Amino acid sequence: MEKSGTVQSVDRALMLLEALATKPGGTRLSDLAREAGLAISTTHRLLVTLERNGFAQFDPVRTRWYVGRKAFAVGVAFANWQSFIAAAMPFMRQLRDATRETTNLGILEDGEVVTVAQVESREIIRAIASPGGRAPVMNSGMGKAIVATWPDAAIEALVARHGLRPLTRKSLRNMEEVRAEIMAIRARGFAYDDEEFTAGMRCVAAVVWSPAGEPLGGLSVSALTVRLAAGDMAALGARVRDQALELTRVMGGWAPD
Amino acid sequence: MEKSGTVQSVDRALMLLEALATKPGGTRLSDLAREAGLAISTTHRLLVTLERNGFAQFDPVRTRWYVGRKAFAVGVAFANWQSFIAAAMPFMRQLRDATRETTNLGILEDGEVVTVAQVESREIIRAIASPGGRAPVMNSGMGKAIVATWPDAAIEALVARHGLRPLTRKSLRNMEEVRAEIMAIRARGFAYDDEEFTAGMRCVAAVVWSPAGEPLGGLSVSALTVRLAAGDMAALGARVRDQALELTRVMGGWAPD
DNA sequence: CAAGATTATTCCACATCGTGGAAAACTTTC
DNA sequence: GAAAGTTTTCCACGATGTGGAATAATCTTG
């Protein structure tokens, strides 16, 4: 066991995968085995395993091994995600500079909103949440903005499955409140979290759309209640909605009617 | 053994990697184990193995697992390569249409040239070579075009290591011939394979340059000698050189002096 | 803040599986 | 067509991967 606590055959397979990645023109079994310091039969079995899983491919005419499309798919899933965040960052910075408050980018995942990127306010006292942070969908501006784009039946199914979290005095507590909230969001084109997740903190959020016209994620500005009066949320919300639409446009997305 | 002839722990590790790829927001150990139908301790060990190899990463603050940058690196190595080929295809088609002969894109790999993409002539009788096909560097137009951009010492080292292959009566056979050929290529800006690899077949080739000013690969047109007279190679070579420079420009590359 | 619940990490006995050498099959070279 | 080289398959053996249990850490609830 070269590395303490790892699975040797997985270590070896990944080493072969990386070696294949450096050889776009492909390589032969025996060359790869020699380079990796493995028995040919071992190398063969590991390559077949990578192949069966789509991470390698074998050209029987040339008798050469190549990286497979699954390695590409896995890597590009990651890369696309990073490029979404990279594309969003200038818009988030602009919005932060315009509002002087923290801006966030989030996605919906299994009944929760995950903050995947954030540009912090330069103010001394600022709203605190970090990338990777999570909130229940119905306590979050970004979550409610995304979910408001769904059919009513899907929203009810989500609430039935995940419940409502009365985290503060202002959190949504029943389906009547949820329905009224969804209608208001649809009318405005943006959502509020008015101390529904954390007392003392508000946010406004709008949806970023994908090229397939699906809600990709949410863009939001969050601030402490001492700095964002309830009366100012509408104007700020319109600003965030416009910025989310601009980001959508730049990314080749579109908002359905 | 669920899949005949594969390595179970590698199958499992790749399945976990793919699962992580669908969760940009990360996932918990116990959730992933449940989804994968594996024991928690098994899943933990496999994830640690992926992590040690850079294919997964663990955020100890959030206690969540994510795809790692190596998956991205491996996938993007593949994707970048495909995008070079994709970018080149329109230029190869243009060149094929203008010349009515087969065009090829190739790279240098360990003393050989590998054809990585090809647009075939529409003529009934045409030059035959296929993607993945290989030729010794000094018998190939693309190979000689690339190598001619190197320092003389590097060329001599390559020849010392890989030798010369007298495949036809016109193949290069000694260093004097090699030096003269390199000088001629440098003067012209493109290279010939004048029946040096296969009797009856000629090609002309020029270099495509990377954004780092390195020779990325070669672009060539190949034809049967009955259709490409020796006297026409210079004009065709200039055409190929110009197209290679245009492709270089479009890809953000540049040719050093 | 303590208790309970849940999740993550580590350990270890056991048997399953991964290993690599050898044989067989196939391909390439001269 | 023989020799050499490479790939594929087989199989005995023991090394390693497995998963349940124990332990540690973290989170949730009241």
Image (tube, coloured by chain):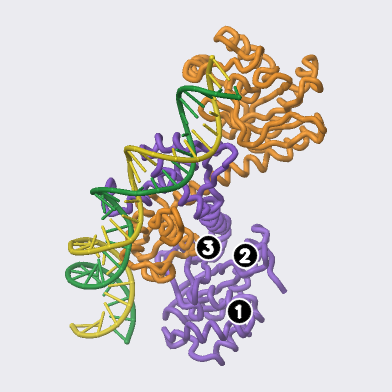
Chain colours: A orange, B purple, C green, D yellow
Q: Residues within 10 Å of mark 3 (few under 14, many from 20)?
A: many
Disc 2 secondary structure class: helix
Question: Where is residue A105 drawn, in percent x and y?
Answer: 66, 33
At x 44%, y 64%, the residue is A26
Q: Nearer the viewer, residue A83 or A251?
A: A83
Mark 3 or 2 closer to N-term?
Answer: 3
Tell if the residue under mark 2 belongs to the same chain as the one under mark 1: yes
Q: Residues within 10 Å of mark 1 (few under 14, many from 20)?
A: many
Disc 3 secondary structure class: helix
Which chain is indicated by disc 2?
B
Q: Residues within 10 Å of mark 2 (few under 14, many from 20)?
A: many
- Residue pointed to by mark 3: B96
At x 53%, y 68%, the residue is B107
**Viewer-side label of 2, 1:** 1
Q: Amino acid at mark 2?
A: Gln
Res A96 quadrant in image: top right
Task: Say if residue B220 shows up in the picture.
Answer: yes
Q: Amino acid at mark 1?
A: Ala
Residue at mark 1 to residue at mark 3: CA–CA distance = 24 Å
Mark 2 or 1 closer to N-term?
Answer: 1
Res A50 quadrant in image: bottom left
Tell if the residue under mark 3 belongs to the same chain as the one under mark 2: yes
CB under 8 Å between discs 3 and 2: no
Quadrant where the C terminus of chain A sits is top right
Q: Amino acid at mark 3?
A: Arg
- Residue pointed to by mark 2: B243
Residue at mark 3 to residue at mark 2: CA–CA distance = 11 Å
Q: Nearer the viewer, residue B157 or B214?
A: B157
- Residue pointed to by mark 1: B148
- Rendered position, A119 above or below B96: above
Disc 1 secondary structure class: loop
Which chain is indicated by disc 3?
B
